[in-house]
Amino acid sequence: MATEYSGGGDPVRSLALLWRTQDGPSSGRRGRSDLGVDRIVRAGIEIADADGLAALSMRKVADHLGVGTMSLYTYVPGKAELIDVMLDTAYGETARPEPGTTGWRDRLTQIAQENWALYHRHPWMLQVATGRAVLGPNAIAKYDYELTALTGLGLTDVEVDATLSLVLGHAEAAARRAVDATQTEQRSGMTDEQWWNAHAPLLGQLMDPQRYPTASRVGSAAGEAHGSAHDPEHAFEFGLERILDGIEALIAGR
């Protein structure tokens, strides 16, 4: 899958779209009254949700909306800027319960689960590199909310940021592996369990338990527990608990 880059277009124009400092027809041109940035962005998300970012183009969005391609450029400069706004729109979906109603561990668990679910709803987000992201209002609000889960615990501001990045990074990595597994199943027409059942006899002949005793024992136990070599949801939950244990030790040390 090709990688897209947040901020890969004109960051100035993306910021104008994200913060709606320029929400109407550009350059004095008159646009259709039933079009607008929000409607174009929703169409882009629907296309990417269904077929991935590889299927996204201004022409596809125009066809989806039943308009001419050039009419979109009245509102959105191009695909790169559209992706910036699509990302920010998706960030606005995460639930944000009232802070202070639960402990920090429960709050971080909820944040991780929200991000895990977000990537499953919109797998195309995993195809966008955000190292130089153009930040919109939803991204900033999401970041601000998520930071509150770690405030007042004795951590420095740098530690708060790094801890949140650790949790979010785990959710993204685990979701990426889960999405990869789902897409592999869709392409092959076989579940992981079906695939491993079909190939296990040959692997059993090639893998000598005497030569690889630990791999044979642990691999068999994991395969029996998960019905395949890997369970993405178990990996997400197990990894999250271990990360939270480490954060708890860091907090206790203060």
Image (spheres, rainbow, N blue to C red):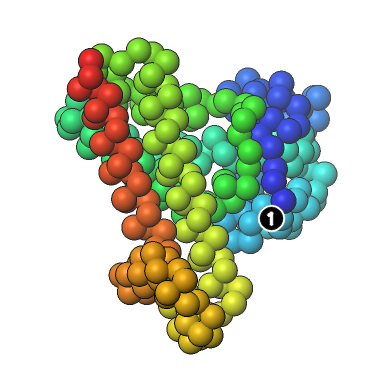
Residue 135, located in which quarter of the rendered image? top right
Residue 124 shows in this picture: yes
The residue lying toward the viewer, choosing from 251 and 139, is 251
- x and y percentages locating residue 238 in the rendered image: 31, 50
Say what amino acid the circle numbered 1 marks.
Met
Q: Position of residue 219 (x, y in %)?
A: 40, 68
Horizontal side of residue 92 vs 108, given as left or right: right
Q: Do we see residue 56 in this rendering?
A: no
Residue 60 in the image: above or below residue 213: above
Q: Residue at x 43, y 42 (%)?
A: 170
User: As drawn, is 36 to the left or to the right of 78?
Assistant: left
Q: Is 215 or 80 nearer to us in this picture?
A: 215
Report which residue position mark 1 lands on: 1
Nearer to us in this view, 199 or 111: 199
- Report the residue at 50% width, 77% height from top: 207
Q: Is residue 88 above or below residue 230?
A: above
Q: Quadrant of the N terminus?
A: bottom right
Find numbered disc 1 in the image and state the secondary structure of the residue it sits on: loop
Q: Which residue appears at 51% of the width and 64% of the height? A: 181
